[in-house]
């Protein structure tokens, strides 16, 4: 089963090839909520001041502060509600009722909050001395006309979307989310919720991979799994490519008699099968069919997850226009010894724990390529380099954090 390691493609070489050949999708003009979570393709500037006019930050009375001491009385000459702009001018000793967000009457330079006055019909008595500028939001307080609001390359968050809206932008240029179709393959597969006949297993990979693609920022959907039949596989793949920016398959890329995926993908387009120097996840198919990147991942559940992490997630992020395509990496101290095959990069599922001397990593249990449990319990994947055969407790390892879920 173990291939001679000199036949293996170094993991970094495979990753480099994938990332060199996958490019950002063309940016689109999209509405604000569509753009939420997407990468902004251009700088966005403010056309105008926000707020556009000086206004009150409180419900209360607009006054001219000068000459009004504590206990002073002012004559109420009118009222301004938010959304109106009456032509009111105020003189010393006068007050205008004003609501939060309403524009200041001409001449006013302070707001006395309603809690700080005694209202006596057409007069108010001030309980405190107003300070010039108090409770006034000047024009341009939040944004100045011409300001750089948001920079190209930024992932648009909730406040960013609000900032665009308040500045009057209803559309922005952003990179669309790639449409990723996930298809599992294998004669042994059964849909969850159905009984298992002897020898059958449930298709979990298409669920895991679709969810992972969504967490990577794709619009991802699973398609019903396909039997190990060359015609059925070709039909399913070709059908999916029509509406996909990326195709991800699981299974059928190893050395078995029924591993037809690599052959079918190679027949449909420019897809190559490689044995990559990594564990788990050695057999990998990658290439393009009709211009669409296709990843043929191995079927073992953990192999497919690790392959996704190493190749597919960064590719999706690149397609989304993201500059940072890698997981956050931390250096951690290993709590337990780890053995690793010489010549392959091994990814060990670990739990992370913060200690006074930094991060500690402990393997989360069985590391077999079918044991999803230890992925569920993991906070990260510890990377053991290809030229390292064993690491003792206390050794330092690089851990790719799995904690980020978007
Ligand atoms: P393959 O890469 O097709 O040889 O599959 C390797 C092993 O992975 C199979 O024997 C199954 O145990 C498992 N497997 C394949 N496809 C799936 C799937 N969709 N969901 C869960 N396990 C799978
Ligand atoms: Mg199979």
Image: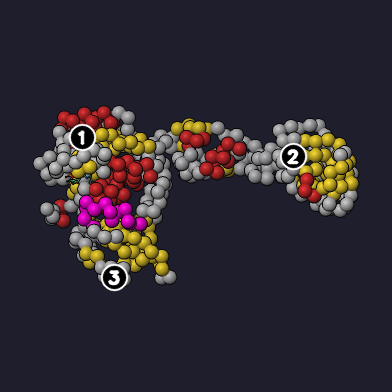
Residue 113 on the magenta span: no
Q: Position of residue 126 (x, y in %)?
A: 85, 49
**Residue 376 lies within the magenta run:** yes
The residues tagged by marks 1 and 2 sit, at their Cα atoms, a distance apart of: 64 Å
Q: Give the magenta-colored segment's residue range.
A: 367-379
Q: Secondary structure at mark 1?
A: strand
Q: Position of residue 403 (x, y in %)?
A: 39, 53
Q: CA distance from mark 3 to mark 2?
A: 66 Å
| Image disc number at residue 226 | 1
- Which numbered circle lies on residue 95? none
* Residue denoted by label 2: 99
Q: Give the main secondary structure, helix, strand or loop, of the magenta stretch.
A: loop
State left or right for residue 181 relative to residue 251. Answer: right
Would residue 251 be seen by someone viewing this image from the given angle?
Answer: no
Dot 3: element: loop
**C-alpha distance separating marks 1 and 3:** 44 Å
The one nearer the camera, 364 or 201, is 201
> Regarding ligand 1, which quadrant of the image does it lie in?
top left
Ligand 1: does it lie within 8 Å of the C-beta at label 1? Answer: no
Residue wearing tag 3: 393
Mark closer to the observer (3, 2): 2
């Amino acid at each position: 089963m173990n291939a001679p390691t000199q036949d293996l493609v170094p993991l970094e070489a495979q990753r480099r090839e994938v990332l060199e050949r996958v490019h950002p999708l063309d940016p689109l003009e999209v509405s604000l909520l569509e753009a939420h979570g997407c990468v902004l393709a251009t700088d966005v500037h403010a056309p105008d001041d926000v707020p556009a006019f000086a206004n009150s930050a409180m419900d209360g009375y607009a006054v001219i502060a000068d000459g009004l001491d504590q206990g002073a009385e002012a004559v109420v000459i009118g009222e301004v509600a938010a959304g109106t702009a009456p032509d009111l001018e105020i003189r010393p000793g006068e007050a205008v009722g004003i609501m939060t967000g309403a524009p200041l009457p001409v001449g006013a330079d302070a707001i006395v909050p309603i809690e700080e006055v005694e209202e006596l019909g057409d007069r108010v008595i001030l309980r405190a001395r107003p300070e010039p500028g108090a409770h006034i939001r000047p024009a341009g307080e939040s944004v100045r006309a011409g300001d750089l609001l948001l920079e190209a390359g930024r992932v648009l968050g909730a406040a960013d979307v609000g900032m665009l809206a308040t500045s009057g932008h209803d559309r922005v240029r952003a990179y669309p989310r790639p449409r990723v179709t996930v298809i599992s393959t294998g004669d042994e597969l059964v849909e969850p919720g159905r009984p298992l006949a002897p020898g059958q297993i449930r298709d979990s990979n298409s669920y895991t991979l679709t969810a992972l693609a969504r967490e990577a920022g794709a619009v991802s959907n699973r398609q019903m799994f396909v039997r190990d039949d060359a015609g059925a596989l070709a039909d399913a793949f070709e059908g999916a490519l029509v509406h996909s920016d990326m195709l991800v398959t699981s299974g059928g890329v190893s050395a078995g008699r029924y591993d037809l995926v690599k052959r079918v993908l190679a027949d449909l387009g420019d897809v190559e099968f490689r044995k990559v120097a990594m564990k788990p996840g050695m057999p990998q198919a990658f290439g393009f069919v009709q211009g669409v990147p296709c990843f043929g991942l191995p079927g073992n559940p953990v192999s497919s997850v690790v392959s996704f992490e190493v190749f597919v997630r960064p590719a999706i992020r690149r397609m989304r226009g993201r500059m940072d395509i890698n997981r956050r990496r931390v250096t951690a101290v290993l709590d337990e010894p780890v053995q690793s095959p010489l010549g392959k990069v091994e990814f060990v599922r670990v739990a992370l724990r913060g200690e006074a001397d930094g991060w500690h990593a402990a393997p989360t249990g069985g590391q077999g390529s079918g044991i999803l449990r230890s992925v569920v319990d993991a906070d990260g994947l510890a990377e053991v380099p290809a030229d390292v055969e064993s690491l003792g407790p206390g050794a330092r390892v690089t851990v790719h954090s799995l904690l980020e879920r978007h």
